[in-house]
Amino acid sequence: MSRIDDLIERLSPNGIEFRTLADVAKTVSGLTGKSKSDFSGGNSRFVSYKNAFANRAVDQTVRDFVRVAPNERQNRLRVGDVVFTGSSENTEDVGMSSVVLTEPTEPLYLNSFCFAVRFSNPELLDPDFSKHLFRSEMIRAQIRRAASGVTRINISRDRFSRIRFPIPPAEVQLEIVRVLDAFGALEAELEAELEARRHQYAYYRDLLATSSGATARWVQLGEVASVRVGQAPPDGVVVESGPFGFVNAGTSESGRAIEANTLGGAVTIPSRGHGGVGVVGFQTDDFWCGPLCYRIVSAHEGLRTRYLYHYLKSIQPSIRGLQQVGGTPALNRKELILVRVPVPQVDEQERIVNLLDKFDELVNDLSTGLPAELNARRKQYEHYRDRLLTFKELAA
């Protein structure tokens, strides 16, 4: 850090210049005039909302395609462009940035739910510096103030254009990039290890849970387990805070509840809605099960619910395939209870559970597993990023 301080003292002893986006950049819009069919069998690459949201630097290896006709007038992305997500369901996630670090080797477009900022002087900010700067808390706080809405949070382009940001000398930018990229490399290593472990976990879960059926008794789910939907929360209202989780149609908690209607140790599978139908989950603690979710527990002394969870998770694609399409996706109980499951001896079930739970803890536990270590690395990066990108402003 002392090298950066020395550089700033030598190159900008009186402070760092700050400018607004309106002063030095223009806005570039995403794709226009496209229908859903244009994204089926497309011929040109584009940056999706997910790509921009998830990556500090645009991942140009992702093969997302859109149909663009010859001579069609659409904006193409260039090196140095900073892509922003234009809307979100909440203010914390709105306006996430992603930078085009290298000149695209072929035309690269931007989806209509994002926009880009292009600097009039390409040498003003090093692209690698931008990838850290525009996700710093100093800029994120201004982006949140530039957004508003109720059910959907959208960025006001006018307020967004007034965002003020520092422009340190090029040498300072590069040194900051060197330090922060080192933290990013550690984070990337952990992400790669976590992804590898997840694949390993999935492999053993599928292998052990299915191979156990070779000598097991096969039965229908409804014969050995209770499969029921929950109820609306107390007073019909989901609260923001409470001692119990509220599990309903999503893949994670849908809120909190002041009471519980289901004991911990239950399998959950959403029955209605978009995105979560058929996704198998397990609730360790007591919770409130909503009316759009099945709660499944063993009803047979020879079946462990935790083993049932691992088996149902291994066949999750098949369970999701049972959903009715057209209108709101739905998974009917009469079809779910017919799913066949193997019931091996209890000691075999416990052996499988012990092994798979170790993998589960490693890849999913936020307090002790790889996710905890990755979270600590991210917080470390964020601490130094915000510290290094805080400057004394040059007096007007």
Image (cartoon, rainbow, N blue to C red):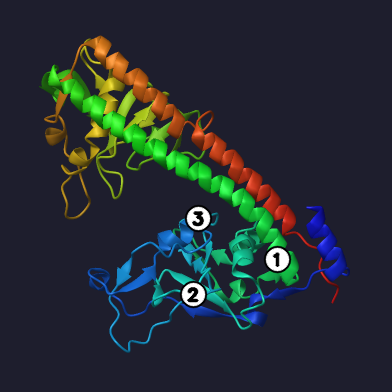
* Pointer 2 local density, CA inside 10 Å: few below 14, some 14–19, many at least 20: some
* Image position of 112 with respect to 206: above or below: below
* Image position of 239 with respect to 107: above or below: above
Return the residue at label 1: 173
* Mark number, residue 306: none
Residue drawn at (70%, 54%) of the image: 386
Q: Quadrant of residue 65?
A: bottom left
Return the residue at label 3: 90
Which comes sooner in the sequence, label 3 or label 2? 3
Return the residue at label 2: 103
* Pointer 1 local density, CA inside 10 Å: few below 14, some 14–19, many at least 20: many
Pointer 3 with pointer 1, Cβ within 8 A: no
Report whether 212 appears left or right of 64: left
- How much space separates mark 3 and mark 1, taking CA atoms? 31 Å
> Where is residue 11 shown, x and y percent of the image?
83, 70
For this rendering, which residue is in front, 290 or 154?
Answer: 154
Residue drawn at (57%, 50%) of the image: 185
The kind of secondary structure element at disc 2 is loop
* Closer to the eye: label 3 or 1: 1
Residue drawn at (29%, 87%) of the image: 70
